[in-house]
Amino acid sequence: MTLLTQREAALALRLSERTLERWRVQGIGPRFVRLPNRTIRYRQQDIDADVAARVVGSTSEREVVR
């Protein structure tokens, strides 16, 4: 299993690293792994699942807050 750094995850999602940090605090966004030395990593499967959960068919669809 490959673990992505915050920078790699941000690049994959085309977001800033700060956005990922903010999402972690808010409890939204992709699930993440906190390693024993407090390092944060992301699994590709969690990034893919988060993107899939955000797919909508129109702008009138209600956003699901997780």
Image (spheres, rainbow, N blue to C red):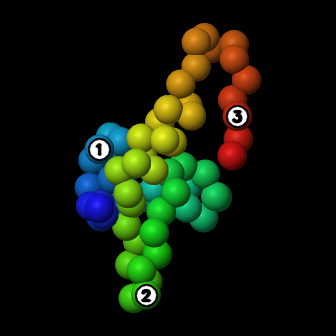
- How packed mark 3 is, by other alpha carbons closer than 10 Å (few <14, some 14-19, many 20 or more), is few
Q: N-terminal of the two: label 3 or label 2?
A: 2
In the picture, the quarter occupied by the N terminus is bottom left
Q: Residue at x 46, y 75 (%)?
A: 34
- Of badges 2 and 1, nearer the viewer stands 2
Number of numbered discs overlaid on the protein picture: 3
Assess whether mark 1 and mark 2 are in contact (beta carbons under 8 angstroms).
Answer: no
Q: Position of residue 3 (x, y in %)?
A: 30, 63
Q: Which mark is residue 46?
A: none
Q: Is residue 5 visible?
A: yes
Q: Quadrant of residue 41?
A: bottom left
- How packed mark 1 is, by other alpha carbons closer than 10 Å (few <14, some 14-19, many 20 or more), is few
Q: CA distance from mark 1 to mark 3?
A: 22 Å
Q: Amino acid at mark 2?
A: Pro
From the viewer's perspective, is residue 32 above or below residue 15?
A: below
Q: CA distance from mark 3 to mark 2?
A: 31 Å
**Which element type, helix, strand or loop, lies under badge 1?**
helix
- How packed mark 2 is, by other alpha carbons closer than 10 Å (few <14, some 14-19, many 20 or more), is few
Q: Which residue is mark 1?
A: 12
Assess whether mark 3 and mark 1 are in contact (beta carbons under 8 angstroms).
Answer: no
Q: Residue furthest front?
A: 1
Q: N-terminal of the two: label 2 or label 1?
A: 1
Assess whether mark 2 and mark 3 are in contact (beta carbons under 8 angstroms).
Answer: no
Q: Which residue is mark 3?
A: 64
Q: Position of residue 52 (x, y in %)?
A: 50, 32
Q: Residue at x 70, y 34 (%)?
A: 64
Q: Amino acid at mark 3?
A: Val
From the viewer's perspective, is residue 52 above or below residue 61?
A: below
Q: Residue furthest bottom?
A: 37
Q: Residue at x 58, y 19 (%)?
A: 56
Q: Which residue is mark 2?
A: 36
